[in-house]
Image (spheres, helix red, strand yellow):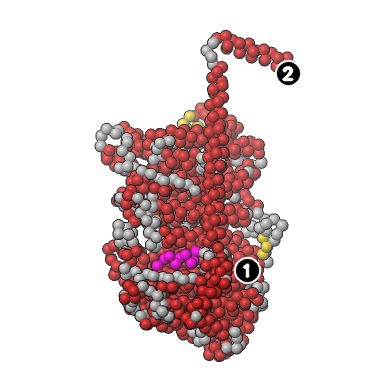
């Protein structure tokens, strides 16, 4: 049924044109009208994206739902979409999260709701396009375009220091991506094609690979973000409105991880191999160093932002540990690499749910109390017991409790990295202690104890809209935690192909 | 059988879900009815499974329930392994849990008093409590019934979660929410080792399934791994020690014991169920389940026996100076867990599990009896303010006496058989460290008897030290409290004598527990075993019985006959007293070094690393550099034509010079 439709184009352009329609309908008329319209568009996009899962053939690693027409024939740039086992789950994560974000801003955003919602819808389409693009320039256009709505979201609906944060965010990510553009153009001159899959096959010397690898690293490491180019993230989160934080944490960071999978590792396998120690080092610093930094944060959003960096450390660790898994002489069975990569993917999806939930929860409190300072709270459980139950649940998921999605990816990556080196697993597993410490200490100070002040005393528990959002996310976290097989199964073929590809030297 | 086994944990889970999500609708009565029915079903079905395996000699059941996922050829599954070890654990867990459920009706009856008036969390706390303890039962069942490491870890963490929720149940109390955070984090330290152990198992056996891993155990014991360059460690030793670190967290062995005494901040029913009878014994169960691995590593067994001995004796000593009725029992639990650990180290797994079982009954009894006293005393827990309660609480008195006698190993009582078996097994062990362990477990007998009866005398005998108001309201607690006490007192007396023959020296555990041929400690004891009665008679030839008697007599003399002695001893040995009273300063050390240190480190990394260096120097520094450079170059843009002409001439000259020389 879906085979005949240009499904990817629909999923990309429906929210973009929908967003434009919302924008045009303007803020003069009925605010509820634009909200309902936005919600309908986001739900329709989500349902369409489920068609990708339904029609997906998980037995092949080939690109599916491919659409290709010339765009700028002079430079061989194509309008080229397609998905595999890596991009398809991330697209569904995007469409799923956008619904929640639209709901989260419902009556909270009073300032220009049409423009606010339009920014999210347009951004949704752009992010899906980034995941689906198979032409490098096509990819790059969406990659850069995606910054604009986020820039506007933080700049217009942000907090007090929004200008500093938004410029920091923009310059950080923009400088990174410029290097990527140079690398892409270089490869076009050398290989004559902007098709990403052609670049995968293109022979490159070690020197070329090294330059290209670091050019990509500049773009993707900032996006993930990896230590030490992470400092834009806490600032951006603190200033962003709740919905912006959710999209940032749940989707945008994943684009960095996805970039490593789609570009860095297959295009420059030898450079990735020779510099894997660097990425592993940066990942483990992210887990441990950032874990300690998260512990002492006083602002809840900063705490969760740092926690995001630590969790994303498992993504990059899982991806780049594969070479050492293969090379470890003690690893007799030689297995573990697929476990690591699939663990990294699951970690991305799970982090999408959990970090989204954490930021939405902070939003729930912020909407009522207008502060994110941990010290301003205490004893919230007495006035918002239902909310507190969700808070403990998502916090436990953030701390990687088995049965929740937070456990799956971390568990896989820890097991896999043990097969490369005991100490990688050792440092990675410290997250069991650190993650629990920073998350649950926050829970203790915010939710437990006696009612701290009159503000907390006056709090009202979740309304129906908030309850819907929280319940939906909780179910997602539980399903992925109790039965990850449906998500992992669609990746197998692509992961297998990816590993076979990067195992072969281009030299 | 598949559906029956599946129904056992799910019945409890069903109760938990109904009481948890629909507590407001079904009310208090509905909540305790549905959870008791759920756990009761689990209990009856567990007994059915016990009958099936133990009395009808069914073969071990090992099947997968569903496939969680497959990645890289590694199967992650949820499945059950049911054999004689499992059915015993299932019956004990569900049995004690059922007693605790009934007891809770009485204990939590006036829970509203524990919450501030405006607290909405307090309105359905009763239902929530039942939901939690049923959820605990489900989690614990998943843990013991597991046939693979992943589900084991799931159960392991799930019981930790429920423990966290229940220690902090009275979330308004600062001490409670401090204790639950501490409990969770200390357990996570253990889990940190545990997960590395699981990772090592996967690496060297390529499987998470118990049986497949056990099949590879011999192979793994031939391999070595290098953790520090230049050293080669036996793989199986590394795996066992890492797994045991997990057990040290859950089963509160030193130095990861610090959370258990604080966990007494939780309501008493859960102290009995979770922090005495079941959850804390998960580590003991796990090591017994893994006996095919542990048996191959003398190093790990030695490590275990030393840790266990230290816990058994040092925690018992702390029990002597505690004045909170629940904390005395808590330290007693720590010490008894030490005994079980010692038994594991001596390869006497069946003795460890046997003691686990008898301890579950008599310790649950002691806790629930302590709870009964606390209810009667209107939530006073200080034993210095009690005394002479015998005449007010006769049922509690007699059941406490039974529990205490079982605990100290009075000949013929359950605890006697299990503890004496451990002492004898250690005596005959050959593991390095067993001499120390033998001294520890023997002196532990005296210490146990001393602190147990110190508490018993101070609570039930002697002068009545409570205030007048409390005294006027003293009366025996309701039947929902006393019936569980009586029902637990029965196995506390009899179960040891009935089962010792089969469990320790018979073929009860069959293939569930593997013992290497050269670890003959318990088998040696078995050679002299000629029935339970002969075992009792034989014990009079050894020192343990006399040590216990000495403990009881000296505590009677010091606390009943000559109370002044206690004070003068305290004055004379004030340093030792302080050491014990401060619990060897573990808490002070941990909060200064680990908690304080982490916060300081985090602060430094944040303020210096992120704020000053990365943001200050690199990010804003490069921005400032650009601004400075722009500022400098802006000076050049003067707008004066002759400035530009001058610059051009200089430029041309420089090009010329370069052209001449290059």
Residue at x 63% of width, y 46% of height: A277
Residue B303, disc:
1
In the foreground, B162 or B404: B404
Q: Position of residue B86 (x, y in %)?
A: 49, 74
- Numbered disc total: 2
Helix, strand or loop at label 1? It is helix
In the foreground, B417 or B194: B417
| Image position of B587 (left or right of B523) | left
**Region rendered in magenta:** B259-267
Q: Using the numbered discs, state the Cα–Cα distance from disc 1 to disc 2 in whole angstroms.
A: 76 Å
Q: Position of residue B148 (x, y in %)?
A: 52, 66
For label 2, count other residues whose C-alpha is less than 10 Å away and answer few (under 14), some (14-19) or many (20+).
few
| Image position of B572 (left or right of B396) | right
Task: Note whether A3 is above or below B437 in the view shown.
Answer: above
Q: Quadrant of the C terminus of chain A?
A: top right
Which-is-in-front pick, marks 1 and 2?
1
Residue at x 68% of width, y 66% of height: B222
* Marked residue nearer the N-terminal end (1 or 2): 1
Helix, strand or loop at label 2? It is loop
| Image position of A460 (left or right of B364) | left
Q: Is residue B262 magenta?
A: yes
In the image as oriented, which residue stretches furthest toward the top? B642
Prevailing secondary structure class for the magenta stretch in the rendered image: helix
Q: Quadrant of residue B34?
A: bottom left
Task: Note whether B29 is above or below A138 in the view shown.
Answer: below
In the foreground, B389 or B415: B389
Location of mark 2 (residue): B662
Chain containing mark 2:
B
For label 1, count other residues whose C-alpha is less than 10 Å away and answer few (under 14), some (14-19) or many (20+).
some
């Amino acid at each position: 049924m879906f085979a005949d439709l240009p499904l990817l184009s629909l999923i990309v352009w429906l929210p973009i044109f929908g967003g434009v329609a919302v924008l045009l309908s303007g803020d003069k008329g009925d605010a509820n009208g634009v909200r309902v319209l936005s919600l309908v568009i986001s739900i329709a996009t989500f349902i369409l994206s489920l068609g990708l899962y339904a029609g997906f053939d998980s037995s092949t690693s080939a690109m599916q739902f491919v659409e290709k027409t010339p765009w700028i024939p002079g430079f061989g740039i194509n309008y080229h979409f397609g998905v595999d086992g890596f991009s398809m789950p991330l697209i569904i994560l995007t469409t799923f999260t956008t619904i929640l974000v639209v709901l989260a801003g419902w009556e909270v955003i009073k300032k220009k709701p049409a423009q606010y919602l339009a920014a999210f819808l347009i951004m949704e389409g752009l992010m899906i396009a980034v995941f689906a693009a198979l032409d490098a320039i096509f990819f790059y256009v969406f990659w850069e375009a995606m910054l604009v709505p986020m820039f506007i979201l933080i700049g217009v609906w942000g907090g007090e220091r929004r200008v500093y944060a938004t410029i920091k965010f923009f310059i950080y990510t923009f400088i990174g991506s410029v290097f990527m553009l140079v690398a892409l153009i270089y490869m076009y001159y050398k290989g004559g094609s902007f098709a990403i899959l052609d670049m995968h096959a293109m022979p490159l010397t070690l020197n070329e690979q090294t330059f290209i690898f670091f050019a990509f690293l500049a773009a993707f490491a900032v996006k993930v973000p990896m230590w030490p180019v992470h400092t834009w993230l806490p600032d951006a989160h603190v200033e962003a409105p709740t919905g912006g934080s959710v999209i940032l944490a749940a989707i945008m960071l994943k684009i960095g991880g996805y970039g490593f999978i789609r570009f860095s590792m297959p295009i420059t396998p030898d450079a990735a191999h020779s510099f894997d120690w660097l990425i592993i080092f940066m990942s483990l610093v992210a887990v441990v160093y950032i874990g300690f930094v998260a512990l002492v944060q006083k602002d809840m959003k900063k705490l969760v932002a740092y926690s995001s960096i630590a969790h994303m450390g498992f993504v990059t660790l899982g991806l780049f540990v594969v070479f050492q898994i293969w090379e470890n002489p003690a690893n007799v069975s030689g297995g573990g690499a697929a476990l690591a990569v699939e663990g990294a993917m699951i970690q991305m999806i799970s982090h999408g749910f959990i970090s989204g939930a954490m930021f939405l929860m902070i939003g729930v409190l912020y909407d009522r109390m207008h502060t994110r300072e941990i010290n301003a709270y205490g004893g919230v459980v007495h006035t918002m017991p239902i909310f507190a139950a969700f808070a403990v649940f998502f916090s436990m998921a953030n701390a990687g409790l088995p049965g929740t999605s937070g456990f799956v990816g971390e568990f896989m990556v820890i097991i896999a990295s043990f097969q490369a080196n005991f100490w990688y697993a050792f440092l990675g597993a410290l997250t069991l202690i650190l993650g629990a410490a920073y998350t649950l200490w926050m829970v203790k100070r915010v939710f437990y104890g006696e009612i701290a002040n009159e503000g907390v005393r006056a709090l009202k528990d979740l309304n129906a809209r908030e309850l819907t959002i929280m319940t939906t996310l909780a179910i997602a976290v539980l399903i992925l935690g109790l039965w990850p097989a449906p998500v992992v199964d669609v990746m197998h073929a692509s992961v297998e192909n990816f590993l076979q590809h990067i195992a072969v030297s281009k030299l | 059988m598949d559906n029956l086994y599946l129904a056992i944990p799910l019945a409890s889970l069903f109760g938990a879900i109904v009481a948890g999500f629909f507590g407001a609708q079904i009310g208090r009565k509905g909540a305790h009815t549905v959870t008791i029915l759920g756990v009761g079903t689990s209990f009856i079905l567990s007994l059915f499974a016990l009958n099936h395996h133990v009395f009808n000699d069914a073969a071990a059941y090992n099947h997968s329930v569903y496939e969680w996922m497959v990645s890289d050829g590694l199967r992650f599954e949820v499945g059950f392994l049911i054999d004689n070890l499992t059915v015993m654990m299932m019956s004990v867990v569900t049995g004690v849990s059922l007693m605790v459920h009934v007891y809770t009706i009485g204990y939590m009856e006036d829970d509203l008093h524990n919450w501030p008036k405006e607290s909405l969390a307090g309105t359905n706390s009763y239902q929530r409590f039942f939901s939690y303890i049923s959820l605990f039962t489900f989690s614990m069942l998943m843990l013991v019934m597991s046939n693979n490491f992943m589900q084991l870890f799931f159960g392991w963490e799930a019981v930790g979660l429920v423990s966290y929720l229940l220690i902090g149940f009275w979330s308004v109390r600062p001490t409670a929410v401090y204790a639950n955070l501490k409990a969770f984090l200390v357990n996570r330290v253990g889990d940190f080792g545990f997960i590395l152990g699981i990772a090592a198992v996967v690496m060297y056996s390529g499987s998470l399934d118990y049986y497949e891993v056990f099949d590879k155990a011999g192979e793994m014991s031939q391999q070595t791994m290098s953790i520090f360059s230049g050293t080669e460690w036996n793989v199986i030793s590394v795996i066992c020690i890492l797994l045991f670190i997990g057990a040290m967290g859950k089963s509160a062995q030193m130095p990861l014991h610090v959370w258990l005494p604080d966990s007494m901040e939780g309501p008493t029913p859960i102290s009995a169920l979770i922090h005495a009878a079941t959850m804390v014994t998960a580590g003991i169960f796990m090591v017994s389940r893994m006996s095919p691995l542990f048996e191959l590593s003398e190093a790990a067994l030695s490590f275990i026996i030393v840790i266990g001995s230290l816990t058994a004796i040092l925690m018992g000593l702390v029990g002597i100076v505690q004045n909170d009725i629940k904390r005395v029992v808590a330290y007693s639990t720590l010490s008894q867990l030490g005994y079980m650990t010692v038994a594991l180290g001596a390869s006497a797994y069946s003795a460890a599990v046997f003691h686990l079982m008898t301890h579950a009954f008599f310790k649950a009894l002691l806790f629930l009896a302590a709870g009964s006293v606390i209810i009667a005393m209107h939530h006073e827990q200080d034993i210095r303010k009690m005394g002479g309660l015998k005449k007010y609480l006769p049922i509690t008195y007699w059941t406490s006496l039974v529990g205490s006698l079982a605990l100290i190993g009075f000949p013929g009582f359950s605890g006697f058989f299990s503890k004496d078996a451990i002492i004898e097994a250690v005596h005959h062990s050959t593991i390095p460290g067993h001499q120390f362990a033998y001294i520890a477990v023997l002196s532990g007998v005296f210490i146990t008897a001393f602190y147990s009866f110190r508490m018993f005398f101070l609570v039930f005998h002697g002068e009545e030290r409570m205030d007048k108001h409390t005294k006027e309201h003293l009366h025996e607690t309701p039947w929902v409290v006393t019936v569980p006490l009586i029902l637990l007192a029965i196995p506390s007396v009899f179960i040891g004598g009935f089962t010792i023959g089969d469990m320790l020296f018979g073929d009860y555990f069959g293939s569930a527990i593997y013992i290497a041929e050269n670890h003959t400690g318990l088998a040696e004891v078995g050679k002299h075993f000629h029935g339970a009665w002969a075992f009792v008679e034989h014990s009079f030839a050894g020192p343990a019985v006399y040590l216990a008697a000495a403990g009881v007599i000296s505590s009677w003399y010091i606390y009943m006959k000559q109370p002044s002695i206690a004070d003068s001893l305290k004055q004379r040995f004030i340093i030792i007293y302080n050491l014990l009273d401060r619990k060897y300063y573990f808490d002070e050390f941990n909060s200064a070094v680990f908690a304080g240190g982490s916060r300081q480190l985090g602060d430094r990394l944040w303020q210096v690393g992120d704020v000053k260096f990365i943001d200050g120097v690199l990010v804003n520094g490069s921005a400032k550099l650009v601004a400075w450079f722009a500022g400098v170059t802006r000076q050049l843009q003067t707008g004066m034509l002759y400035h530009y002409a001058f610059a051009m001439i200089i430029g041309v000259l420089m090009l010329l010079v370069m052209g001449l020389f290059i």
